[in-house]
Amino acid sequence: MKKATILIISSFLLLSACGNQEKGISQSDIDELDKKEEKQNEKIHDPLKFAKADKNEIFISDEGMGEFKMLKKYTNSNSDKNGITPISNNGFDFNFSYMLIQDVSTEEKYLAYFGEIVNNADKRLEFLNKVKFVTDTGEQLTPEFGIGTGALNEDLTSGSKVKGFHKVKLEYADDIPKQIGVSVDKVDDNENMEHYGEVQKLQLSTDGTPKENIAKPIDM
């Protein structure tokens, strides 16, 4: 009889403990977990939104270029809290996030930039995607550039803007860069048949503190 009583009391205490643990999980906790799960499962179509996104989020190209998973962002002391590193080239502004992405289907890895360009200059200007990457792993990579190379290739009137992305495949996919140098060429003033602004150079790293003597940006 004594053993049975002890067993009943023990069972009661165990059930009480479980009940208290369940009470410790509030509805707000559950809602927060649901939001996190939704965010992880959400696939992003907007390149500017993806520029501000977190690691492991997925971008789907509306131009049929595939699905890409973000693996890393490359930043420096000028980058904002979302990983966007702004450049102003005499009023022609680049708001890009530079990153390592992976094609979900093929698992090929790419260096890429996502974001927007804004023409705050007082004339019509065109960006031709003339960008060069160098990496601390020894690669020098140039994405396809020129007319027709994606949404960012746009002849923008003063005060206008456009968002998009561009990418270039890593030749040595198993050798992941921790630091990159980026050179962004002058934009084009087609009306006067001349270049506008200066070449912009960046050093970026996965920890946000690039070393000056590593992966130096090259001339255009």
Image (cartoon, helix red, strand yellow):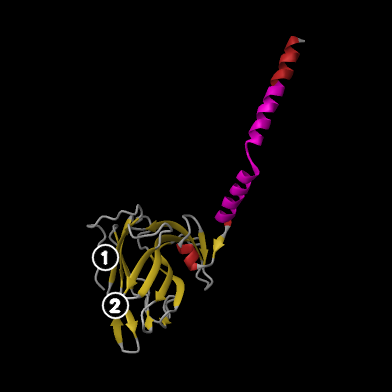
User: Quick one: 138 or 120, which is closer to the camera?
Assistant: 120
Q: Is residue 125 above or below residue 172?
A: below
In front: 122, or 111?
122
Residue 30's image quarter? top right
Q: Earlier in the sequence, mark 1 or mark 2?
A: 2
Q: Which residue is mark 2?
A: 197
Q: Are marks 1 and 2 in contact (CB under 8 Å)?
A: no
Residue at figure coordinates x 46%, y 72% from the top left = 163
**Residue lying at 55% horizontally and 61% vertically, measured from the top left:** 43
Which amino acid type is shown beneath numbered disc 1? Pro
Q: Which residue is mark 1?
A: 217
Disc 1 residue crowd, few under 14, some 14–19, many 20+, Cα 10 Å: many
Q: Which residue is most to the left?
A: 213
Q: Residue at x 57, y 51 (%)?
A: 36
Give the structural element (helix, strand or loop) at label 2: loop
For this orientation, the residue located farthest to the right is 1
Q: Nearer the viewer, residue 122 or 210?
A: 122
Task: Give how far apart the Cα atoms at labels 1 and 2 are.
Answer: 17 Å
Verify whether residue 23 appears in magenta.
Answer: yes
Q: Which residues are magenta?
A: 11-40
